[in-house]
Amino acid sequence: MGFFTDTSVCIGCKACEVACKEWNDVPDVIGELTGESYDNTSSLGANTWRHVAFIEQRTPAGVPDADGDVRWLMSSDVCKHCTEAPCLDVCPTGALFRTEFGTVVVQEDVCNGCGYCIPACPFGVLDRREDDGRAWKCTLCYDRLKGGMEPACAQACPTDSIQFGPLDELREKANGRLEMLHEAGVEEARLYGANEEEYGMGAFFLLLDEPEVYGLPPDPEVVTRKLGSLWGAAALAAGALAAGVVAAFVGGGR
């Protein structure tokens, strides 16, 4: 199960942010306007598990029905619930676990606040709350899923920009929507995170520009994939050192 977020129909109402805070009892820290946009929550964090970005940019050449030379891109970001989740791999206490729905959840009563999961996430999703030091993020409304309900953000979205369901069905919808936009002349439209072979995401997006425009890494990396080769290299080095010590001992005894 997962999310498909179609940013082409997002209107920036932030109903998803509010619904997430209300259902999950996330602190209602409103934030302040940064002066860079009309967004007042800035980014995902311990107190913002859904974040709607407001991106003002010059309209690229060739965009049909452009209103003047400036356009707004709206995008509701969230935890990607990765197929290979580095945050889960590095957690030493088992506070992070994969649910029966394929999503990744932090158990707040097990997290010890070590923070290893925070730099492991290539999307900057995980964050520690200042008052208790523990890591927090979207649970994809685990408690609602167990009750047979859809996540609060998807239910609150008035334009169906956020869709919830089995990932195979969502990918089929996303590909159909992408084809429709391309036929309408929106050539910049693209899917991000929908290809499992590139980087499996339980939350993927239809974007109207490059991922970097939305603050998303163009080529996210599973940092824990390197751990196997690092441990192998360390084992080889330790073996060579031990062999050298034995050789020196044997040689010195002659």
Image: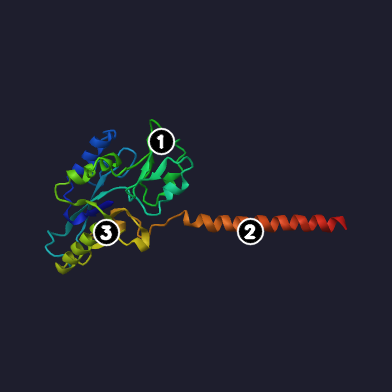
* SS at circle 3: helix
Q: Amino acid at mark 1?
A: Arg
Q: Position of residue 99 (x, y in %)?
A: 35, 45
**How far apart are the alpha carbons under marks 3 and 2?**
42 Å
* SS at circle 1: loop
Q: Position of residue 222 (x, y in %)?
A: 43, 55
For the point 58% across and 58% down, the residue is: 232
Q: Which quarter of the rendered picture does the C terminus lie within?
A: bottom right
Q: In the figure, is residue 90 to the left or right of 232? A: left
Write down the residue under mark 3. 168
**How far apart are the alpha carbons under marks 1 and 3?**
34 Å
Location of residue 175 with respect to 27 vertically, above or below: below
Write down the residue under mark 1. 134
Q: Position of residue 125 (x, y in %)?
A: 35, 46
Q: In the figure, is residue 109 to the left or right of 21? A: right
For the point 59% across and 58% down, the residue is: 233
Looking at the image, tell me whether mark 3 or mark 2 is earlier in sequence order: 3
Q: Amino acid at mark 3?
A: Asp
Q: Quadrant of residue 170?
A: bottom left
Q: Is residue 60 visible?
A: no
* SS at circle 2: helix
Write down the residue under mark 2. 236
Q: In the figure, is residue 221 to the left or right of 239? A: left
- The 10 Å Cα crowd at callout 2, few under 14, some 14 to 19, many 20 or more, is few
- The 10 Å Cα crowd at callout 1, few under 14, some 14 to 19, many 20 or more, is many
For the point 29% across and 33% down, the residue is: 27
**How far apart are the alpha carbons under marks 2 and 1?**
37 Å
> Which of the two marks, 2 or 1, is nearer to us in this view?
2
